[in-house]
Amino acid sequence: MKKLLMGSVLAMSSIFTVTACTSVNATTDTTPTTSKMQHKDGMKKAMNKGGMRGPMSQLDLTATQQAQIKAIMQAQHGDRKADRTKNKAERAQMQQQMQALTNASTLNTAAVNRLADQQAAKTKQRFIERVQTQHAISQVLTAEQRAKLATLKAEKMAKGHKGSEHGKMHGKPHQGM
């Protein structure tokens, strides 16, 4: 049971890592290279004008829909700066605990299980919040917009899974499961 739990946690973290890498790869393949400052300035301008980014920008949203979606996203993300600081501290603490377990002369399986349960609970909560946000946004869209969004997401997934180009670009080999 313990091996199954650890295997599941490792598999989920690998999946999230691969997904994040392919998401970054999909975005970098389709956008021209710009400096980070230009990108941030452009994003701020787009959001200040009420504009959407990503697939949402291609849905011909009304001003009301844009305002509703922006409100949903703000409610979901809240104070990102405070969250980033909190998450960074939590990751550092988790890393220290993992290092202590790794360096111990004997493996404390109870502590490993506690850490795995904590990580699984965080992963589960992020998943639930993501689905809730996507559902709330979906309710703002018309049937045609939902269909177009599904098509755009499918195209992005198909494009993003042509291999691990992100890992190759950064000198890291793709690690399969």
Image: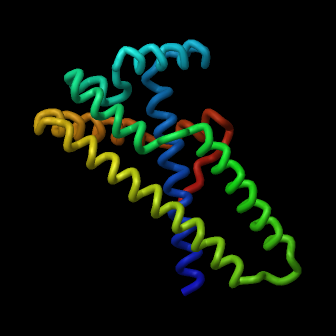
Q: Residue at x 52, y 71 (%)?
A: 8
- Where in the figure is residue 49, as x and y percent of width and height? 37, 14
Quadrant where the image shows the N terminus: bottom right
Could you tell me how many numbered marks the image carries?
Answer: 0
Q: Which sits in the foreground, 45 or 53?
A: 45
Task: Give the quadrant of residue 71.
Answer: top left
Q: Position of residue 39 (x, y in %)?
A: 53, 17
Q: Residue at x 46, y 29 (%)?
A: 27
Residue at 53% over, 14% down: 41
* Residue 2 placement, left or right of 67: right
Residue 60 visible in the snapshot: no
Residue 36: horizontal and vertical position, in percent?
Answer: 60, 19
User: Compared with residue 100, is residue 86 higher up or lower down, i.e. above or below?
Assistant: above
Please indicate, yes or no, whether residue 173 appears anywhere in the rendered image: yes
Residue at horizontal 44 percent and vertical 33 percent from the top:
26
Closest to the observer: 136 or 107?
Answer: 136
Q: Is residue 18 above or below residue 4?
A: above
Classify 82 as above or below 61.
below
Front residue of this view, candidates 79 and 133: 79
Q: Position of residue 70 (x, y in %)?
A: 35, 31
- Camera-side residue: 39 or 167? 39
* Residue at the farthest bottom position: 1
Please, which residue is most extreme toward the left here?
143
Coloration mode? rainbow
